[in-house]
Image (cartoon, rainbow, N blue to C red):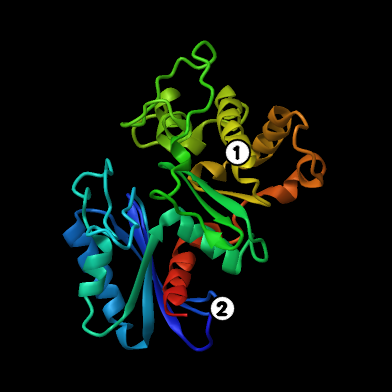
């Protein structure tokens, strides 16, 4: 990123928006958390925050929950599409941020997980790695990918949380919670899925499930089977696992072990056989991956 410039980053989530003013070294100069309510109320507070730093900013990047319309030729470019988040379907977050400022401020948008991947590539665990995956496991499950130095897009954008892992209904009779696909990966392994399956209570967190509970072994299996699919298709050089569910300390080790078990040595590489702790890793930036990556989106739009 070019020297002596500041950028705004917006990590737009279904629960909260994280907004930050970031310099080219990834240092956060100011940050705010804004609850996600209605589009009008939420974006009004977002724009109020950045208006205080308006004269110092070169651009604003948005990493948003989705699905998103990311086709620049589309009349709905920058809009959230078929989200289950009430009131947000077909809301154009990019357009609102662009119109909020009078001067020609560069505004860029991508998925929240692609932004997080970009943050880790620029400042964190994927620095110097040109092909990798960032997967977040929390309220939902989503994945961003960089392949040969470029964030992955296609027909729309990757929806890694909505593939279908093998679901043994004898071992796990739970039907799943995804409102679209029911027993896709998100429906079986997201935080809300764990809370519902194990009846933890409406206000509980998945990480309240005790260590040693068989639910963690099942969670590791679902996530490892998904990772193996990504490995077979995209052949990443690193996989970064973030999100609230991954804050259960033993889970990462369990996933690594399950990946090795399920792979059955079909893919032969030292990282898989001998150094899997360097292949499947936590985010180096912690909870800041998304907002830092969003600021890099703004920089990349200009330069």
Where residue 266 sits: x, y (%)? Answer: 75, 32
* Residue 213 lies in quadrant: top right
Residue 29 showing in the rendered view? no
Identified at 50% across, 62% down, the residue is 288
Residue 165 showing in the rendered view? yes
* Residue 25: image tag: 2
What's the distance in space between the residues labelled 1 and 2, CA to CA? 31 Å
Where residue 12 sits: x, y (%)? Answer: 35, 58
Q: Residues within 10 Å of mark 2 (few under 14, many from 20)?
A: some
Identified at 65% across, 36% down, the residue is 255
| Residue 54 located left or right of residue 190 | left
* Residue 227: image tag: 1
Helix, strand or loop at disc 2? Answer: loop
Where residue 197 sits: x, y (%)? Answer: 43, 23
| Residue 154 located left or right of residue 246 | left
Q: Residues within 10 Å of mark 1 (few under 14, many from 20)?
A: many
* Residue 284 lies in quadrant: bottom right
Discs 1, 2 touching: Cβ within 8 Å = no
Question: In the image, is residue 28 above or below residue 41?
Answer: below
Residue farthest to the top, as pictured:
170
Residue farthest to the front, as pictured:
73
Where residue 150 sits: x, y (%)? Answer: 54, 62
Helix, strand or loop at disc 1? Answer: helix
């Amino acid at each position: 990123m070019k020297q002596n410039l500041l950028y705004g980053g917006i990590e737009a989530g279904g629960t909260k928006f994280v907004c930050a003013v970031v310099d080219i070294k990834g240092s956060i100069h100011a940050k705010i958390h804004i609850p996600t309510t209605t589009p009008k109320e939420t974006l009004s507070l977002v724009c109020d925050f950045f208006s205080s730093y308006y004269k110092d900013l070169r651009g604003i990047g948005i990493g948003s929950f989705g699905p998103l319309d990311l086709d620049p030729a589309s009349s709905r470019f920058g809009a959230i599409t078929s989200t289950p988040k009430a009131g947000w379907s077909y809301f154009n977050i990019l357009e609102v941020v662009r119109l909020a400022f009078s001067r020609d401020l560069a505004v860029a948008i991508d998925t929240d997980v692609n932004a997080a991947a970009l943050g880790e590539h620029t400042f964190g665990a994927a620095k110097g790695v040109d092909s990798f995956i960032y997967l977040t496991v929390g309220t939902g499950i989503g994945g961003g990918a960089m392949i040969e130095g470029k964030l992955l897009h296609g027909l729309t954008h990757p929806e890694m949380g909505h593939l279908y892992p093998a679901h043994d209904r004898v071992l796990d009779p739970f039907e799943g919670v995804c409102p679209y696909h029911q027993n896709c990966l998100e429906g079986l392994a997201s935080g809300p899925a764990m809370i519902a399956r194990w009846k933890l209570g409406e206000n509980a967190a998945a990480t309240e499930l005790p260590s040693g509970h068989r639910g963690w072994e099942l969670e590791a299996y679902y996530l490892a089977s998904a990772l193996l699919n990504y490995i077979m298709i995209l052949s990443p050089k690193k996989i970064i696992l973030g999100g609230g569910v991954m804050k259960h300390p033993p889970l990462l080790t369990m996933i690594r072990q399950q990946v090795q078990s399920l792979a059955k040595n079909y893919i032969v590489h030292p990282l898989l056989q001998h150094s899997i702790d360097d292949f499947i890793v936590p985010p180096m930036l912690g909870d800041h991956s998304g907002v830092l990556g969003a600021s890099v989106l703004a920089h990349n739009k200009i330069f």
